[in-house]
Image: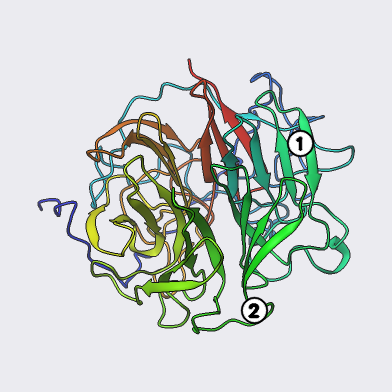
Amino acid sequence: MSRPHPARFTRVSSVVGVVVLASVAIMVAGGTTRAQSGSRTSAQSNSGIPMPPSGSPAGPLAYSCGAPTAPAQGGRGQQQPVFPLGQYPVKLPAVSLLGARNDLPNPYQPGVDWGQLPPGRKWGSTASVTTAPDGTIWVVDRCGNSGAGGTTCGGASANVNPVFQFDTSGKLLKTFGAGMFISPHKLAVDKDGYLWLADNGSHEVFKMSQDGKILLTLGKKGVAGAGMDEFDAPTDVAIAPNGDIFVGDGHTGGGTASGNARIMKFNKDGKFLKTWGTKGMGPGEFDVIHTLDFDSRGRLFVGDRQNNRIQIFDQDGKFIAQWFQFGRPSGIHIDKRTDTIYVADSESRDGRTNTGQLSLAQTGYGFNPGIRRGIRIGSARDGSVRSFIPDPCPYPYPSGSSMAEGVTVDSAGNVYGADFLTDVRKFVKK
């Protein structure tokens, strides 16, 4: 059977069942994990999940690959794989069904846990890591909690700071944000150094100074709506060179008819200008807009995640192109000096898992067959993909998300990934 052309996207609603064979007592993530030195081994929790090395800022899920923590049938501890690692009866092809390569060179060393957090603090789930014009690195997590949306920064976590600024060595420069957000998602820094944060828990977007002072608010707190002054779980913000504000809206209802699926455009003062997009798979249609960025020419790159593609538009919403070769985009960063594009794929899966449990919702959410997760690196000018930092978790993945959901790069070319599974990792060039 011939492979479909990369520009042709077909939604597949059925999920291939998993044939359960004999249980094998092999941990999903293995007993040896990557520490900051790359050679230390981790402890294990009572549930059998490998724990981060002593002194690491990584949260408790960072080395789990998202493996289930419920007891295996007829046994105790973590759900075990039903196939030995490397012996699952599906081998990934060199190129996925939608044209993303799995066999590209990796010019980076294994990722190391990164960021000097305050005493007692560990990373929670994060989708956001961002390089500012001054070269510092900004990270937003869910107040030390695991999860997305909802009220991850509410309740007992309302006194926990979710916003961090570091230098490239990982030294903490600043932290703030306690009590300001419900569930922060992604943060952007504009050319003047202002911070823009999309809070998909409160359905708002904030412009802030680097001291955390709120300068502008878009949306209505606690109101998920489709009005021109409302959002439904906004995900990311991108600021054009002239100051116009572009918001990805929203995160609700992936694979279903519910929720918003549009780009909202405002002027620099927050006045509504226009919107485009609706639920669908055609050009200019969206399903879970998850990440935004501009290239050096001012073209808007939209991570249309549930459709497993990047869509490119001019600033008036005119469709330019769609690319499937970078995988399922959870995060996009474009280096404006070179137009090098970094795309983080943290969710692609086809329903199989090596734990014998399906990892695909009945809506088909996350379906992108034949692809390995990781960070693909290429050109925003012509769409070529040159290199790939693969997800170290074994295929088929035991959970819905692993490795980087957000991505950025520093002036030395080192890559940073923000993980839903409670970590931030730095990938240094070989």
Label 2: which residue? 220
Identify which amino acid the numbered label 2 is placed on: Lys
Front-most of residues 95 and 1: 95
**Residue 49, image x, y percentages:** 70, 45
Q: How is the image coloured?
A: rainbow
When asked about the image quadrant of residue 424, the answer is top right
- Element type where label 2 sits in the image: loop
Identify which amino acid the numbered label 1 is placed on: Pro
Q: Are marks 2 and 1 in contact (CB under 8 Å)?
A: no
Q: In this picture, is 66 found above or below 376?
A: below
Q: In this picture, is 28 found above or below 145?
A: above
Label 1: which residue? 57
**Residue 371, image x, y percentages:** 34, 46
Instruction: Assess disc 1: are there few (<14), some (14-19) or many (≥20) residues with their C-alpha within 10 Å of its C-alpha.
Output: many
| Residue plotted at (78% across, 63% down) | 180
| Residue plotted at (69% across, 23% down) | 169
- Element type where label 1 sits in the image: loop
Q: Specify the farthest residue to the left.
A: 2
Front-most of residues 94 and 346: 346
Q: Earlier in the sequence, mark 2 or mark 1?
A: 1
> Position of 406 compared to 169: left or right?
left
Nearest to the eye among marks 2 and 1: give it: 2
